[in-house]
Amino acid sequence: MSKRKSKESISTNGECISQVQKLLRERLCHHYATGKLFGTEHQYRHLLELLKRTTVHGESNSALIIGPRGSGKTALLNHVLKDLMEIKQVRENLLEVRLNGLLQTNDKVALKEITRQLRLENVVGDKVFGSFAENLAFLLEALRTGNRTSSCPVLFILDEFDLFVHHKNQTLLYNLFDISQSAQTPVTVIGLTCRQDILELLEKRVKSRFSHRQIYVINSFDFKQYVRIFKEQLSLPAEFPDETFAQKWNNNVQHLSVDKTVQDVLQNLFHYTKDLRSLHLLLMLAVSNVTVHHPLITASDLQEASKQYRMDSKANIVHGLSVLEICLIIAMKHLNDVYEGEPFNFQMVYNGERNA
């Protein structure tokens, strides 16, 4: 009887651990915006109001979200869109087109992607267009369902916006900003970039079409808020299937947040970088150690995860080499500088090491 109970307990714990890891991995890997936004409440209200004007009132707009990598630009936008989708009118009508400067490397590729995401391949068919502007205008015309207020609003999201600046004549940007000012279909263009000087890179004609709305995002939270983010990212929601385990897990997270060892780990990471993706990676490494026989995260798990995160891969390669091997590497480095990347052989390395 006791063996059966033991097996059932292990099975239950196994299911809980699987659910915990699935939930937290989705949250940490996809940078899902959970709970309250830290330090970007003003930017959230600004962006929400801007997108409401398009999705609810049929206005067209354009804006740039500017901030360093990892500052939460995408998380902010996703959070706003998530809240907007709770409005029935928005959920049923809003069309999103997401472009990335790393993927859509020229206007032709970008136009094909716009057509695909708007599901207008059959409408375009084999039609030949005289210009990019004509093609884009045709796509938007195909979406019209009457007047400006009854047309489906279109949201263009341009990630790595600064890379689109390098497209020939900035045709894509010009036409997107142009239709956001004059098209009958409500259109909003949102660009995300880490370049503070982005406006200086725009051509004069493109700049004249841009609304000059800029939303700056920066990690301005202090260490107390950072610890709150740590707790929020690790905590299980109230709707978790096993309430008893969820309470036990959340109590453990609360104890970890005030533990001196854990606070030292978090403080080192906080001073190293405020990028929340780094915190997500640290937590992901710790969550990966959770098993049926080790169901709760410990301070030592976070310490070990911190060591793995801060590990220098190049230093690890050198670690454990003999003195002679290190001398040969130094000689190779010296020869590489002398010959400016030209090939050299072992005899030259050996001679260099002897003469050193």
Image (spheres, rainbow, N blue to C red):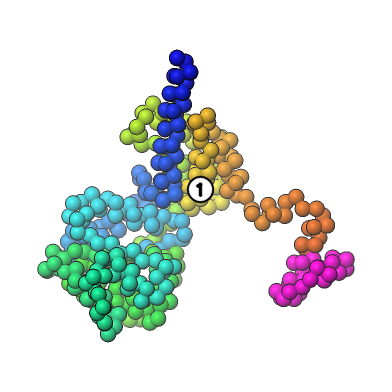
Few, some or many residues within 10 Å of mark 1 (<14, 14–19, 20+): some
> Which residue position is annotated with label 1?
281
* Amino acid type at mark 1: Leu
Residue 329 visible in the snapshot? yes
In the orientation shown, which residue stands out farthest toward the right?
Answer: 354
Vertical order, 135 against 315 (above or below) = below
Q: Position of residue 267 (x, y in %)?
A: 55, 44
Q: Quadrant of residue 155?
A: bottom left
Seen at 78% across and 63% down, the residue is 330
> Which quadrant of the figure contains the N terminus?
top left
Does the magenta segment cover residue 164? no
Seen at 34% across and 54% down, the residue is 78
Q: Is residue 226 left or right of residue 348?
A: left
Q: Quadrant of residue 101?
A: bottom left
Q: Quadrant of residue 351?
A: bottom right
Residue 64 visible in the snapshot? no
Vertical order, 32 against 9 (above or below) = below
Seen at 43% across and 76% down, the residue is 166
